[in-house]
Image: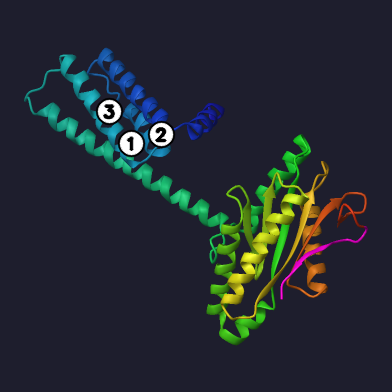
């Protein structure tokens, strides 16, 4: 039973809103037909909750309300054409209204629960200050790209971005200004990358970028563009903040997430050690265990240095 529910959940999540609503309508009509066949002495009220729950959970609030109304109508019609006899003609109307109220409350509660869970899911996966991914969510995307690299040999690039001398901003202007700088950095990086790329704040003033299906040449252009735009934004704030970036492209089939993170982190710190405010892009070499350029023996190449 549990496996059936999980399979239905996967199918429903992949379905469009119209498909979900259509399924709920068919479900409500089927229950209505069975309700008519079994007669008014056997109550099937609880079975209408299935289509209502599907519409409210997998579609939206309006769909849940619509299916609740349809379910109530199905029950009312089944009662009328089934020949149910009441002591007063208004009794079935009253029963229908009471049932409708119950169905509407359930639909609204399911919708509220879904919204709450979606909000908590987003909060658990995003950085509270900047709104980008947090380290946990970023690790999941990294694992996915590692799996894709192992299965299909697709390259990806992982980059670490560190704001140089960020501590001076907090010391000189306060944490409020520091938070504004971090938010501006996260927003600029997000706007500079593709929709398929991922950005996360790993803590403090350090960000990570994940560029799927991106080789070293593509990474060089994308990272240089992001670095230039970020530098313009940081300089516009007159806070004398720059950034150092270490980006590593991976082609290896046998590679762990920790190895990938360590390689990008090491390259970023190598940039900081050579003067900061620059970009370095390398290709990971599994034999050496470090990021190297394809044409040089050095462990990195500086592609850009501002001012």
Q: Which residue is mark 1?
A: 63
Classify residue 19 by image quadrant. top left
For residue 80, side relative to residue 114 (left or right): left
Q: Which of pointers 3 and 1 lies earlier in the amino acid sequence?
A: 1
Tell whether label 1 touches label 2 (CB within 8 Å). yes
The single residue placed furthest to the left in the displayed view is: 88
**Residue 194 falls within the magenta-colored stretch:** no
Report x, y in % for residue 233. 58, 71
Q: Which residue is mark 3?
A: 71
| Magenta span of residues | 297-307
Q: Nearer the viewer, residue 192 or 190?
A: 192
Q: Nearer the viewer, residue 271 or 288?
A: 271
Report x, y in % for residue 53. 38, 35
**Residue at the spot 55% in from the left edge and 63% down from the top edge:** 187
Helix, strand or loop at mark 1: helix
For residue 47, side relative to residue 174 (left or right): left
Check the image and report above or below for 191 versus 114: below
Please identify the dominant SS of the magenta region: loop
**Residue 304 falls within the magenta-colored stretch:** yes
Helix, strand or loop at mark 2: helix
Q: Nearer the viewer, residue 95 or 202?
A: 202
Report x, y in % for residue 65. 29, 37
Q: For residue 17, which numbered disc appears in the image?
A: 2
**Residue at the spot 53% in from the left edge and 61% down from the top edge:** 131
Tell whether label 3 touches label 2 (CB within 8 Å). no
């Amino acid at each position: 039973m549990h496996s059936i529910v999980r399979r239905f959940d996967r199918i429903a999540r992949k379905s469009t809103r119209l498909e979900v609503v259509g399924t709920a309508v068919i479900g409500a009509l089927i229950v209505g037909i069975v309700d008519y066949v079994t007669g008014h002495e056997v109550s099937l009220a609880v079975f209408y909750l299935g289509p209502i729950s599907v519409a409210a959970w997998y579609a939206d609030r309006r769909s849940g309300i619509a299916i609740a109304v349809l379910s109530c109508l199905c029950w009312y019609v089944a009662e009328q054409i089934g020949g149910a006899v009441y002591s007063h003609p208004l009794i079935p109307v009253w029963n229908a209204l009471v049932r409708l109220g119950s169905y509407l409350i359930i639909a609204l509660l399911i919708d509220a629960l879904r919204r709450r869970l979606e909000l908590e899911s987003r909060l658990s996966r995003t950085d509270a200050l900047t709104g980008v991914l947090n380290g946990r969510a970023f690790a999941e995307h990294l694992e996915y790209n590692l799996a894709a690299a192992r299965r299909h040999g697709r390259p990806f690039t992982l980059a670490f971005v560190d704001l140089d001398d960020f501590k001076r901003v907090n010391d000189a202007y306060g944490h409020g200004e520091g938070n504004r700088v971090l938010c501006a950095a996260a927003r600029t990086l997000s706007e500079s990358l593709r929709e398929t790329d991922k950005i996360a704040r790993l803590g403090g003033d350090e960000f990570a970028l994940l560029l799927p299906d991106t080789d070293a040449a593509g990474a060089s252009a994308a990272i240089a563009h992001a670095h230039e735009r970020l530098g313009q934004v940081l300089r516009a704030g007159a806070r004398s903040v720059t950034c150092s970036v270490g980006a590593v492209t991976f082609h290896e089939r046998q590679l762990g997430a920790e190895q990938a993170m360590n390689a990008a982190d090491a390259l970023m710190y190598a940039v900081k050690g050579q003067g900061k405010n620059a970009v370095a892009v390398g290709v990971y070499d599994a034999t050496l265990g470090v990021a190297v350029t394809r044409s040089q023996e050095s462990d990195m190449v500086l592609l850009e240095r501002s001012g």
